[in-house]
Each structure stands twice: as C-alpha cells, then as structure tokens.
Amino acid sequence: MDGATFENLNLFLNFGLPLLLLMIAYFIGSMVERRHFSSIRKRENENRGYPVVSFDTMPDDWKVSESTMVAGNIVVSLDYFKRVIAGLRSLVGGRIKTYEPLLERARREALLRMTESAREQGYDAIFNVRLETSRLANSRGDGNGTAGVEMLAFGTAVKFASRFARTP
Amino acid sequence: MRYVPKQPREGINVSDTHPLVEAGTLVVGLSAIFILIVLALVFLIELALYFVPAEKEAELFRDWLPDDLVTVSPGDERLYETQLLVDRLAFHWADSPYEFRVEIDDSEVANAMALPGGLIIVTQGLLDQVESENELAFVLGHELGHYRNRDHIRALGRGIVFSLFFAVATGSSDAAGLGLKVSDLALRGFSRKQESRADEFALAMVYTQYGHVNEAWRLFERWDNEDKSILDLVTYLSTHPQAGDRVESLESLAVSEGWPLHGRVTALQW
C-alpha cells in the first residue's frame, strides 16, 4: 500500500464512512417511520368509534358491569441520522424537530395497543387514560447515549351493563 | 355529554419541516459559525504574533518544559550531539532571538517538534531512524525553519481550535466530532504550506553547513519506499506533505539553486 492509497483510505474512514452510515440510516429510518405512521392511521381509523377518554371519574350515564386496568407499552429508538441532527441542534438549542415524529409515534402506538388489548378482552370503553414516558439510556459506555424512549399508556377499561346504557 | 368519535389531528405535535431541510439548515448555519470562530482565532493569533515579538517569546518560555514530556537523562550522548548540531546550524541564522534547547522524547514514532521558546523535541524513534548527520541536520533545520516563520505559535493556535472543538464534541455528541474532522482536513492545507516553507529553509541551512545537499532528504526517500514506516507515521503524514512529494520538491529546489547534489556525507557522532 503506497502513501496515496493510505491517505485515500484514511479519508474514506474519516469522512466517507460516517456519511455513508448517515445516508443509510436516513433512508431506512424514514422508511420505517412512514410505514409505522400508515399502520397507526389505519388502526386508528378501525378503532374510531371506541371511547377512550381521560376523565378521572366515570361519566354518570355509563352503567358498567365489570372493569379492569389495561395498558399499552412501546419502546422506540432513534436512528443515527436523527441522533446526529439532534446533536447538531443541541449545540444551538431550539426545537429538536427530528425527535417529534418519534414521540408522536410512541404516544399513538401506546394508545392503540392499550385500546386493542381492551377490545380483545371484550371491554367497551376506557376512561382515566394516562401516558407516561421514561428514557432508556446507557447505549454508550459513558451512559450519555439514548437507547430510546418507553411510552406507557394505561387506563380503566369497562364493560357496559347494557348496550344501550350510554344513550339516555 | 355525548361522546363524538374523532381521529386525532395530524401536524400539531410534529413539525412539517423535512428532516433533510432541518439537517441542511443546521449544517450550513453551524459551518458558518465555525468558520467565523476559526477566522477570529487566526486573526487573534496574527495579532499576538505582531505584539509578542520573537525576543519576548524566547524570554517568556526560557525555562519552560511541557508537563507530559518524558525525557532522557541529561548526560545522554545522543542528546548532547543533537544539541551540538542544533547549535552549529543555528550559527548560520545569525540574528536568531532564540537560545535553542533540545530534548529527546521517549516515543517510538519518528517525529520532531518546535515548541515555544526555542525548545526542540526530537523523538527516540527519529534518532533510531536517521542514518547520517546530514539527514538529522535537515530535520533539525526544518524545525529551525518553523521558528524562523514562527509557525510553532500558529500551530499552538491550531491546537486551541482543536481542543475547543474537542470539548464541544465530548460535551454534546458525535456530530461535533465530525466537525472536528472536517476542520482538521481544512487546516491540513495551511499546515502543508508551512511545512514546505520550513523544508526550503532547512535545505538552505544544510547547504550552508555542508556545502552540498547530499542525503538531506534520504530519510523521506526511505519512508517513501518502506510501506511499513509510512503506516507508522500516520500523524506525521497527516499534517506534512507526502514523503514522495517532499523529495521531488526538495530535489527541484536544489537543482534550481545550483546546490551540489553530491558530497561527503558526515557520519553520526554516536
């Protein structure tokens, strides 16, 4: 290997490889995100008529026979592209726009999983819905990296005593 | 209260800026800021060079030694001979404000450095690799050339830029690390120009000392031929011109100046 080849290899390792990784991460990341969003929209549409509310007490006109707690949970991670852009953003501050779709996906997916679990068990509605987020760190040796976020949605699912109880 | 089912509204929690637009804005904006910082630092360094003349610098750093330097014992033969050679070479630079001091670093990587106050550091690795006094004289003359052009102060300035960005890089993310690499590439161009000027000074000095320039660039010829040592010299090659290019430009300089390419080679004194 002569000097020029070595220099070129060095250049590639220093600049080409990170750029290549960034591009791959961008394409895969945005494809995954697009597919996830379209799945979320489709399932939200299927669950459109199902009551999921955040009241902490049950509406007076609900006559219920049974209740249980339901939960939906998701852990999502950033792609390398988003992480790098967010890193650049953190130098000057401001909205980390690349993180916003990630959290949006997490929230809606967690709510959907909760809803779907309640429907599968034959419940008719969910009230007192709450969302919680926790950050999973330690993806890097120094503990500063972000492995991803966990989004937890939970609420009280109820079975109506009568199908007609809702409408007075 | 009636429950009216609705789909969640889109576009409230997610900004509609395309990620690539966001990336482009950040990269362009931050590069502009970075260039401004570097230009400001370059300006400050030139200002410092103007207000702190070489005499003042030599006085300020008279007894200074870097803390992390591991030196050989003061009685070392190679240290003595190298110091002697530097003194003989510096004799040809009559109005030099520096009192040159030589220290030997115990590193195996062949390298030589010019530090403020006339402190020349040569590594064990370099002394192991030189085969004649003429070769060593050229390397030392090269460092003297850096003092002549006061490149060593500019190199310190570069070091400040790097440590600044290194601090940002460790503080935030791997993104700044990429910026560090880009700035390194940008600064290599400046660095190579300085190295060529120092090479020219060194060759003139070797000619004045020995009356010919035989073997002056033998070291670079060997590095150019030996693949292995080129791999060992990553740090050297990154800031200096390629060994082969150096040999070529030195040869053409000697020819155009009419300096003899042949002459008696002086053996090393150890």
Image: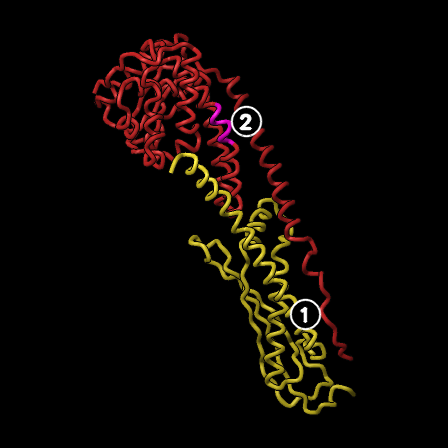
Chain colours: A yellow, B red
Q: Is residue A48 above or below residue B22?
A: below
Tag 2: Cα neighbours inside 10 Å, few (<14), some, or many (≥20)? some
At x 60% / y 75%, what residue is drawn? Answer: A113
Residue A100 location (% of width, % of height): 63, 58
Q: Which residues are magenta?
A: B187-193
Quadrant of image for the N terminus of chain B: bottom right
Chain ID at mark 1? A
Mark 2 residue type: Val
Chain ID at mark 2? B
Mark 1 residue type: Arg
Front-most of residues B152 and B235: B235
The reply to whether the magenta stretch includes residue B192 is yes
Quadrant of image for the C terminus of chain B: top left
Front-most of residues A63 and A80: A80
Residue B6 location (% of width, % of height): 74, 73
Q: CA distance from mark 2 to mark 1?
A: 54 Å
Q: Secondary structure at mark 2?
A: helix
| Disc 2: which residue | B42
| Disc 1: which residue | A41
Residue A18 location (% of width, % of height): 50, 47
Q: Is residue B101 left or right of residue A136?
A: left
Q: In the rendered structure, are the residues bearing label 2 and label 1 in contact, judged by CB atoms less than 8 Å apart?
A: no
The quadrant in which residue A92 appears is top right
